[in-house]
Image (cartoon, rainbow, N blue to C red):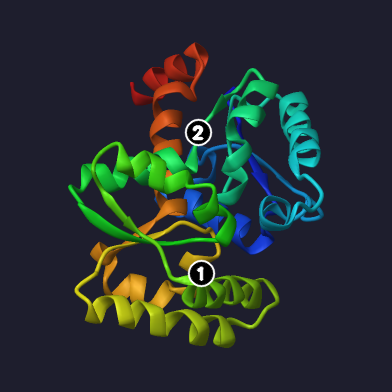
Amino acid sequence: MKKILGMLGGMGPGATVDAFSKLVTNTQASKDQEHIPVIIVSIPDIPDRTENIIHHGPSPLPAMIDSLRILERAGVSCIIMPCNTAHYWYEDLKSSVNIHFISIIDTACNKIIEMGIKRIALLATTATIYTQLYQDKLKKHKIECIIPDEINQYKIMQSIISYKAGDLIKAKELIYPYIDQLKSLGINKFVMGCTEIPLILNEPAKIYPNDFIDATEELIKETISWYNLNGYTIDDELNKVVEHY
């Protein structure tokens, strides 16, 4: 039996759907049985991550660990979590289970480094920026991470909130002017460091794919690479050989 991937989702639900969609789209498969087995735990009543970090609201950590326990009991062999801000608790979550856990922050930063980018604008929640999840990693590689001023960051947060509330038009209206402003200043590389943002910026990201690093996409690609190396048992490999001949 093939190993099973676990996805800790619900932060938010739309971003979880996007991550699963990208998993299916990026997997090379000619039939259902060749896709990666995945168990998704999407419990959206996990306390808000930004509310905790910025305003000292309820901690989401206990609820996230509870969700991890569900995946652990289900027997998954690898875990991903399509939420950037939640990676503030990555080490705590990782140490709570004895399961391989791939970081969305690491995979996105590795892509930026691999592309040789020296200056990039970070589009993320206020909490992700405040905790410097991206800045600290990129600084080690002498990559300048441009963050919004207070007014534009407020608009980005309102854009994310609007998307979560189902108002995609308002979400776009709030964030698009900032993208145009940065481009007018010669800044044309962006890391979409919140898993709702690729859904808001879907159109410009399709038109200018080299300008936008999609953290969700990079997480999924790394997950598929890991699975292709580690996701099959010896019996699976033997069956492949038998089928080939």
Contact (Cβ within 8 Å) of mark 1 with mark 2: no
Judged left or right of residue 72, residue 141 is: left
- Kindly tell me whether residue 21 is visible in this rendering: yes
Residue linked to disc 1: 199
Q: How many marks?
A: 2
Please say if 194 is above or below 175: above
Query: Looking at this view, is 66 or 132 the one in front?
Result: 132
Label 1 sits on a secondary structure element that is helix
- Residue at image position (37%, 18%) is 241
Give me the residue at 61% from left, 22% from top.
99
Q: Amino acid at mark 1?
A: Leu
Q: Earlier in the sequence, mark 1 or mark 2?
A: 2
Indicate whether 123 appears above or below 38. below
Please state, as top left, top right, bottom left or bottom right, where the N terminus lies in the image.
Answer: top right
Report whether residue 28 is seen. no
Name the residue tied to disc 2.
102
Q: Is residue 122 left or right of residue 88?
A: left
In this view, the residue in front, 88 or 191, is 88
Give residue 188's quadrant in the image.
Answer: bottom left
Density class for disc 1 (Cα within 10 Å; few <14, some 14-19, many ≥20) is: many
Quadrant including the C terminus: top left
Between the C-alphas of marks 1 and 2, the distance is 22 Å
Numbered circle sitting on residue 132: none
Q: Quadrant of residue 67?
A: top right
Give above or below for 26 relative to 93: below
Residue 229 pos. (x, y %): 39, 24
> Would you place residue 12 above or below residue 161 in this image?
above
Q: Position of residue 8 (x, y in %)?
A: 66, 42
The amino acid type of the residue labelled 2 equals Ile
- SS class of the residue under badge 2? loop
